[in-house]
Amino acid sequence: MTNPNAPRGWLRLLIWLESLRADAVYGWRQLKKHKVTSGAAILSLALGIGACTSAFRLIDAFLLRPLPVAAPDRLYFLSRQGLDWNGKPGIDQECQYPLFLQMRAAVKDRAELLAFSYADRVDLSFGSDQEIEKAHLQYVSGWMFESFGLKPALGRLLTENDEGAPGAHPYAVLSYDYWSRRFGQDPYVVGRSFRMGETLFQIIGVAEKPFTGTEPGTFIDIFVPAMMNPYVTRSDASVFRVFAQLKPGVAVEPVRAKLQANARAFEEERAKEFVGVPKQSLENFLSQKLVMEPAPTGVSDLQNGNRRSLAALGVLVALVLLIACANVANLMTAQAAARAHEMALRISIGAGRWRLVQLMLIESAWIALLAAAIGAVFAWWSAPFVVSKINPPDDPVRLTLPADWRVLGFALALTFGVTLLFGSLPALRVSAIKPLSALKSREEPHSRRGLMHALIASQVAFCFLVLFATGLFVATFEHLSHTPLGFSAERLLTLDTFAQQPQPPALWSQVAEHLREVPGVETVALASWPLLEGNSVNSYISVNGAPPIERLAYFLRVSPGWIATMKITLIDGRDFLPSETAPGAAIVNETFAKTYFQGEDPVGKAFARSEDYRDRPFRIVGLARDARYGSVRETPLPVVYVPFQGVRRDGSWVRENWGTFIVRTSSANPLALAQTLRQEVPRARPEFRVSRIRTQLEINLAQTVRERLLAMLALFFAGVALVLAGVGLYGVLHYSVLRRQREIGIRVALGAQAAVIVRIATLDLFSMVVLGAVAGLGISMALARYFEALLYQVKATELSMLAFPSVTLFIVALVAALSPVIRAVQID
């Protein structure tokens, strides 16, 4: 039997669709009719939508996008949290491979453990030893590919059989990305070899395309078995990160407790061999808690280091979008007021109020859709641009930034939300029009102005917060950029140099002597690594044979002349002599003297590292000014400079296969000598090759990449927010003067002075500016603590930080009010 209601329902649907079509056509005509106004609305929204979409792409790639592996939701990352060796809260993410094997065996029935080294950027050669190139290489558990459900694109992948004896299986698997970039997808790459150090690796396959490793921000080029790592047998070398892949239905806590017990027993056994470690420091170390955190997106230092920065970026772009929405909402409200007669006529001839709401929302949707289209182009360009600014050009960050359903879904949801956000208020105001009053030109201007003023107050509050955050980020960057480093980076070039086999100190010195003869070279010195690179070696210190003090000292091996080359002030004593070795002579900094000698002059006094404090002392021959060691942010550390040439207990020389030549040039542009020096190093000694050349300034700048990026983006969005707020203030005041033109004319005719007219025209607006600024101040204070981790020597409560947004907004309000006020005063 036919349902009599069915045709009627279809008819209603067709009528509604026809009304949508008609309103869409009419809305498009309205946009074309008001080209300037519509264009301004579309561009302001486009910037907000594009910025939000771009920020989402970055946040998604770093923090939200699951790894392309089987069951990423069952993947957990292991770390130890608690007090570190210095008694400060810390997180230890590394594990020794012998401990990893014990833990894997302990939970084999409930979880699979996977070991990953850090993504090292190594030197390797596919041809002759002269053709050195760099690639990101990672040591991984052989069973990783099978556990992750990954298939080969070519050849075969590593298996558990490749994890035999240490060094027994020199096989390598290339990532699809590296295979495409380096070899042009050559199908005959399987079977080729490359040399890394003294080991020849054979390529056995290529991993499938989506998988680029477990470190967001870095694409792994080459995977090799963990058992090929030179530290794989050492219980004192923590070089692996550990993931746990739980089996279906297994709870986290029992697995964590089992792993905790294993780790504690392993470290207690190892601690029996520790010499000279303070009791409290040892207890802090053994009391660390093993933590299992969900890691469906993988784990990387870039991810952890930029988490708060991305959150701050997300807040900034969201605020800019809200300001743009408030602007467009005010614009739509003003347009609705101008069309009051039209709407009243529509109601009078039978149009329902919902139809008016639909009409206004469709016009808003046109603006939002056009803005989203332009914003998509902005997001497509801006996300990779921001990524390119995170790291130096010689080792750029790489992220997967596809325009897939995740990004498309976010953009569509954002467009829908924006349409409702700025279109609903004008639509509701239109639906509340009283036809008789509107046709008699007696609509309700005060309530409409009240809505517009409320939106202005919101704009000002959001703008205050953007300016407040901008002031904090810019001040942080300025403080970091001008922090005294204790050395001069001008005209300094660093040559990271390696040898295939460890070489004695005499050969390193020969290369340094040869480089000193190169034209344009002023001085040359040698160090284990450059300052501020982030490396460190530390140990506890014993003075005069006493038990070690519970604070770590940091060491750097340098050659004679390094202090002068770095232009570090030598307060007392002398530099190293060519004949001095480590252990033996030492130069210490001021913080070391304060920490271990209570500020007394330490020159001539002795100390020893905790492991050698009974029989291998150092005698201090010099006292140097503090120089930043590993990070610009850290307070000065107790640092010991020791001779680059070291001797073992049996009297033999310590051989090194890695070091950095520090070259101060006579040219203002040290990179002009880069290629020459690269060629001169192997010319001096064929055993040596230059791995990387950087200026010291470049290394210093890398310390402030995050702060520079935040300051740059914050300034950009602050400028956009100010322009939007200024346009909004101007628009509302201009509309207010036009609506009150008759009233102002009467007041002028009755003798009102210009000051009175200015007060009448601007009082409401400036009241909203003050109200918005106060609200913005309150919100800023409430959120200030979330910014603290991103700040350096800046407090949110400083008067300058609070005055900057207040004064800036007041100036913008004055500029925005100038033209409408002049118009009001000149009314005849």
Image (cartoon, helix red, strand yellow):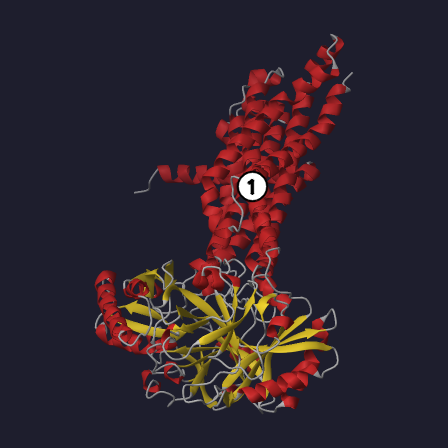
Q: x, y (%) of residue 483?
A: 59, 56
Q: Residue at x 72, y 24 (%)?
A: 821
Position of the C terminus, as image quadrant, is: top right
Q: x, y (%) of residue 285?
A: 31, 65
Q: Nearer the viewer, residue 545 or 763?
A: 545
Query: Are there few (<14), some (14-19), or many (20+) residues within 10 Å of tag 1?
Result: many
Disc 1 is placed on an element classified as helix
Look at the image and tell me whether residue 444 can be seen: no
Q: How many labels were placed on the picture?
A: 1
Q: Residue at x 43, y 58 (%)?
A: 64
Q: Quadrant of residue 339?
A: top right
User: In the rendered image, which residue does mark 1 sit on?
Assistant: 468
Direction from residue 691 to residue 817 in the image, left or right: right
Q: Nearer the viewer, residue 667 or 194?
A: 667
Tag 1: residue type?
Phe
Direction from residue 449 to residue 137 in the image, left or right: left
Q: Residue at x 57, y 16 (%)?
A: 436
Q: Nearer the viewer, residue 337 or 595?
A: 595
Q: Nearer the viewer, residue 421 or 97?
A: 97
375 shown above or below 340: below
